[in-house]
Image (spheres, rainbow, N blue to C red):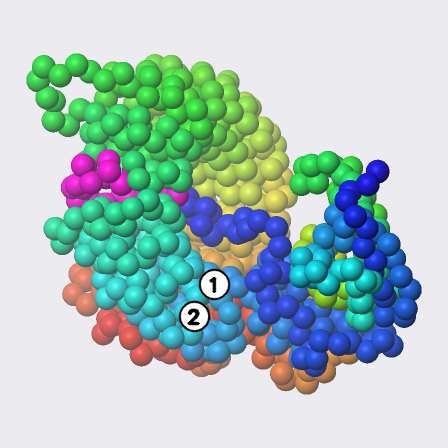
Amino acid sequence: MSYGRKITLKSSDGETFEVDEAVGSESQTIKHMIEDDCADNAIPLPNVTSKMLSKVIEYCKKHVETPKPDDNDELKAWDADFVKVDQATLFDIILAANYLNINSLLDLTCQTVADMIKDKTPEEIRKTFHIKNDFTPEAEEEVRKENQWAFE
Amino acid sequence: MSEDDDRSPPSDLGCADSESSSKTRNCSGISGSGSTSVEVQAPYPDQVLENVLENVLCFLTSRRDRSAASLVCKSWYRAEALTRSELFIGNCYAVSPRRATTRFTRVRSVAIKGKPRFADFNLMPPNWGAHFSPWVATMAKAYPWLEKIYLKRMSVTDENLAILAHSFPSFKELALVCCEGFGTSGLAVVASKCRQLKVLDLIESEVLDDDVDWISCFPESHTCLESLIFDCVECLINFEALERLVVRSPYLKKLRLNRLASIGQLHRLMVRAPQLTHLGTGSFTTLDAVQGEPEPDYASAFAASRSLVCLSGFREASPEFLFAIYPVCANLTSLNFSYATIDVEELKSVICHCRKLQTLWVLDTICDEGLQAVAASCKELRELRVFPVEAQEDFESPVSEVGFQAISEGCRKLESILYFCQRMTNAAVIAMSKNCPDLVVFRLCIMGRHRPDYVTGEPMDEGFGAIVMNCKKLTRLAVSGLLTDRAFDYIGKYGKLVRTLSVAFAGDSDMGLKYVLEGCPNLQKLEIRDSPFGDAALLSGLHHYYNMRFLWMSSCRLTREGCTEIARALPRMVVEVMQEANAVRDEERRGFIDTLYMYRSLEGPRDDAPEVVEIA
């Protein structure tokens, strides 16, 4: 089924992807380029690898194809599966979604990472994301106290 | 949610924001080196996370999660501070406005709490403090994009409201709960200058009548108003102006009139605003009967209000008009009859229709029989408050353990109860502990001092013991009646999740308080009056006071020396001692202080305390 004309996207590592205009327009960045008539040739996306671009296209295609995306349980389940990837990939998708300005994908991926932070202690969060604690014990205690006494 | 025995259901301003879709659009976006072209070679995972952190943290809304995130490492601390948009200050004296605004620079919504709850019962000197002034002055400069302010038990002046109105061009929501110090002039400035105002909620606040017609001050064109709550305002409102305001406020969903509004006026407003979801009916009686005019069709107006889910008011309710609300009962989730002296039959006629009711506030005039009717009809009930029409100690109250037990048997989903009565039994309380395992808030006020179990003559220890033992989710508890140290032993042993505890006229010795202070690791707020706890008991809590929001003890057996010792042992506690200057002191109370109010603070003792407050 055709959704209007096709456009070509070119990843940072030179690979090209042909997609329907409607699918590409899920990205505000690409949409503006189409509107500004820059889409006759391949649209270069120097900040997005082919691996990421194919993932993002997969997301946009699914969302364009699904009727009533705001109220669709099947789509929600599909989204939940879509983000079941390793941490590094998840962060890369966030970067790509941000650069390509795809709000729903940005919300979805950021919410997923936020869910990994919820209900955890600071040490558990550090372990989850392999982060080093660079607070001195005194500084950490001061922050803990300020949090508890003033803002909780 | 308001946690107190106010007469009006809480404003939901304090709850999570229901912003639509992308929260990330509010953020500064990806932070990092500032360059838009990322290197082709993938950066290390933690570097990437740092780049996306602000976007991610926008999705953390709970205070606990934000606290945890801020402690992960320095860059997370900075990112969390930049992305915190809702600031909560549990005690206005625990932190200074400057410290708060220096750390959190992009706040859109602020909630500040001031005086402790016992201030509501005139147990505090009138000008004790909790002034909004330093906060509004600092925020005016620090938060030009501020949209929401929620204040509880703060002292607010007209000048404060004027600064607010002039400093925040995007201001949208103001909720003043249990506040005082301002008047209709202050409201007028807010109404006229805050052109984007969506919410103006005045709840249980004292509003001075400066003879200013604030209702006429809202924008002349369509307003953004969604909620206008002024049921506590004791001054006459310009009714014609209110009518015009309602007509030009198409988004209005919540409207709560004061008791000076007649049922005729209510009717005129209802037909102009059938889209309301929350309605405070005002007096619900004819205040100035106009001769010769036909009676409006009140029932019709209610029938047309298809979205009504929350009904309150009934301030001088005439039972003859009660039938008018029948059309909306089936959809009601919240009903506040706490000002309506309706009797059993009147209550029954209404409640039998209220199958979806989740929140009910009533007066004890409905009697045990009325409570039985509630138990039979309201299977979805989550919160019940039964207030006394006569709050005197030697009065025969019409509700007792009979109604209490009936509720426990009929309303199994109960989560919160506040119950005033003159007599109770352990058996009924034990029954509720078993029938209602979801209880989170249990406040039983057996009026009259030291009243034992009505049937057995025993102390009420076993009843309250059963509550802490069986209600595993309990976080708030108020005890009363004849209680020995044993009751406190139970609380210390089983009340592991209790955060707020209120004690009045209870206990035998210092052991009681010791059990609680040593046994309840989550205790945050402890308010005690007229109980025999002394310095030794006070000192037994030294290990825990820095973990608490506050401790209040009035008319107990504390001495100045005891307070000084605490202050010395805990240098970052602010220990306020209040002594009523010219009180006639009987032999028993000589040597003891009237009131101790103490709280931890990052700032040290405050400099705005009135003379009657001594800081140890």
- At a point 22% along the width and 51% down the height, the residue shown is B217
Where residue B108 is drawn, which disc sits there? 1
- At a point 40% along the width and 31% down the height, the residue shown is B275
Q: Is mark 2 on a helix, strand or loop?
A: loop
Magenta-span inclusion, residue B227: yes
Residue closer to the observer: A92 or B210: A92
Tell me where residue A68 sits by quadrant: top right
- At a point 64% along the width and 68% down the height, the residue shown is B29
Residue at numbered disc 2: B143
Q: Is residue B475 left or right of residue A48?
A: left
> Which quadrant of the figure contains the N terminus of chain A?
top right
Q: In this view, does B205 lie above or below B322?
A: below
Report the magenta residues as a range: B226-246
Query: What amino acid type should be assigned to the residue bearing mark 1?
Result: Arg
Q: In this view, does B353 lie to the left or right of B136?
A: right
> Whole-Å distance between the Cαs marked 1 and 2?
7 Å
Chain letter of mark 2 equals: B
Is residue B496 something that shows in the picture? yes
Q: Is mark 1 on a helix, strand or loop?
A: loop
Residue B239 in the image: state x and y as whole percent.
Answer: 19, 37
Residue B50 in the image: state x and y as whole percent.
Answer: 72, 73
Q: Mark 2 Cα within 10 Å, few/some/many (few <14, many 20+)? A: some
Query: Would you say the residues marked 1 and 2 are in contact, meaning their CB atoms lie under 8 Å apart?
Result: yes
Return the disc, 1 or 2, that comes first in the chain's sequence: 1
Q: In this view, does B306 lie to the left or right of B129?
A: right
Residue closer to the observer: B76 or B20: B20
Where residue A137 is drawn, which disc sits there? none
Residue B322 in the image: state x and y as whole percent.
Answer: 30, 19
- At a point 41% along the width and 69% down the height, the residue shown is B144
